[in-house]
Amino acid sequence: MSVVARTPERTTLVRAVCVREWREAIGNKLLVGMTLLPPVVILGTGVLAVAAAAINPPSERDIQALYSAAPAVRGLDPVDAVQGFIATYFLILFMLIPTVVPLTMAIYSVIGEKSMRTLEPLLATPVGVGDLLFAKSLASTVPSVIVTWTAYAFYLTSVVLLGSRAAVNAVTAPRWVLAILVMVPLLTLLSVNLGILISTRVNDVRVAQQIGGLVVVPVVAIGIAQVTGRVVLDNGAFLQMTTVLIVLDLAVFWLAKIAFQRENILVRWR
Amino acid sequence: MNAHRLDPMGIALRTEKLTKRFDRLVAVDGIDLEVREGEVFGFLGPNGAGKTTTLRLVCALIAPTSGTAEVAGYRLGVDDAKIRAAVGILTEQPGLYERQSAWENLVFYATLYGLPTAVAAKQAERYLRLMGLWERRQEPTATFSRGMKQKMAIARAALHEPRILFLDEPTTGLDPDAAKTVRDFIVALRGEGRTVFLCTHNLDEADRLCDRIAFFRHKVIRIDSPDELRAELYGRATEIRLLPAPRPEDLARVRAVAGVREARFENGSIIVASTDPLRTNPLLVRALVEGGAEIAYVTERRARLEDVYLRIVEEVVEGGEAPLGPPR
């Protein structure tokens, strides 16, 4: 049997890197915990909140506050309106999952390699660093997207079973389904590449997480603006946000690619 | 082994004025090197001499500032991926994925070297057996000793049967048993005609393993075989043990013999450096016996490579360069 080393096919490389990183992640209980905790908390709280709204009728004060924050629900049955509002509010929180979950994994993926000194032998192979970066991005992106979609699927099922007509309409609104399908992967990619970029400059996972955690700020800001009625998340707003995310994703990946060069990694990374 | 049978007269590695600067620091200063196929080439120098940078340059991990190199028949800067496929490198740190098993580590790397699944598995098994790690293949490498990790790293470097194997301090920190396994492995590679480029501070190891040695400090100071370096710098020495201890008149008699370059007392013996010991030694014995000396034994005295290293270092320092640090 002859042994001829060569650059592996891109799909082979991506599969090998993903499988290795996932094995590594599964073996790291802290990482698994930090990955699963946010979706479990958001999902659990969301389902409980929708269920609680059905059991406990809102007070007159709550209803007035809701009508002033969301004029569109005026005319609906108060219980339906509150359930619909809560269901929508938690959909915004679902957008936090792709910013938090992959960040930890992406940071471990680079800082872990730095601390274990595994980067030099890895870079000594005939793989291209761009392909390696892409494979690493994908290794963190795929589980996060799957976790978010799975959590959304559970949420959707729970709301259909427990919620009012207005709540079901809110969570199955085409713009929210599209947001979950399109914006979740885009937000995940942004978070992953930001995590990789930050990891090239720092060696401490906690510091990287603190810096990377800033990525949730715009999502939280949009959520607050929507809850307080300052922003209406209509189709146009979703389209604008998607465009901005695509541009940001490309820019951050480009920056990560510049930082992720063989010589930079071996000589300048500390 | 699936080794390439190489032309022993061929050149595995050739550098031409290869230079690497980091801002103002010149780490590698225009080196011209030729490493022959099938030889074990020692690369010796103090800490901070630029050895690791040189390794990274010729393994196409970093780009030269100027100059070029041909590695395993490929041009640096043109065929970098092919160079990385054709060489194997043992880095200073083993750098293993410690949560993963020995088997998973090797199969992962075999995949990155483009080996098909069946070949990858076969090569992983072959090298795990060769390094005596087969029985522990399913264990996470975090549970391995320093020596086992180093053997794993060597297995990883050799897994894809590279034409040139670059080994950076392969036996540092290993117990004698593990170090012997590694040295035997290097000898086996040479037996197969594989080229080994060995960076080491272990001068005894370099002496035993290397066909040629380069003394290096940012630039190549000297290249030759260990025997030639010793012979040139110290001549060929003979140790003559006398009973009882040698007297000053014995030393004078020795010095008077034709062909003797230098003679001195050392630990109750006379050490004699001569140009041709085969011709000089019988004359020495006769002169001492005629002078009434009792000879216990006469033996060849080989200068240690460490003496050669220190002497060359001394020359560099006297030549006006900054003093060198001690070997690690």
Image (tube, coloured by chain):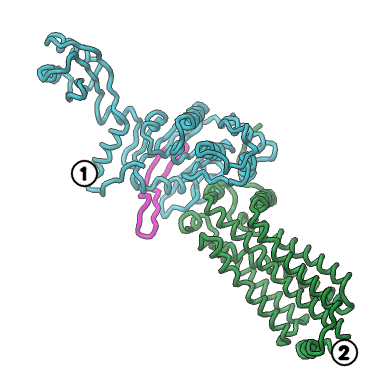
Q: Report if residue B13 lies within the magenta region.
A: yes
What main secondary structure does the magenta stretch of the protein show? strand
Residue located 58% across and 37% down the image = B159
Position in image of residue A50 (x %, y %): 82, 75
Chain in green?
A
Q: Considering depth in this image, is B156 or B257 the residue closer to the camera? A: B156
- The amino acid type found where label 1 is placed reads Glu
Q: Report if residue A238 lies within the magenta region.
A: no
Q: Is residue B91 above or below residue A252?
A: above
Q: Considering depth in this image, is B286 or A67 the residue closer to the camera? A: A67
Position in image of residue B265 (x %, y %): 17, 24
Q: Is residue A137 visible?
A: yes
Chain in cyan?
B
Q: Chain of mark 2?
A: A
Q: Is residue A30 above or below residue B14?
A: below
Q: Quadrant of residue B109?
A: top right
Figure quadrant of the N terminus of chain A: top right
Residues at marks 2 and 1, CA–CA distance in whole angstroms? 97 Å
Horizontal arrangement in the rendering, residue B12 relative to residue A62 (left or right): left
**Residue A215, numbered label:** none
The residue range painted magenta reads B10-34
Residue located 40% across and 38% down the image = B200
Q: Chain of mark 1?
A: B
Residue linked to disc 2: A75
Residue linked to disc 1: B318
Position in image of residue B224 (x %, y %): 34, 33
- The amino acid type found where label 2 is placed reads Gly
Position in image of residue A194 (x %, y %): 60, 66
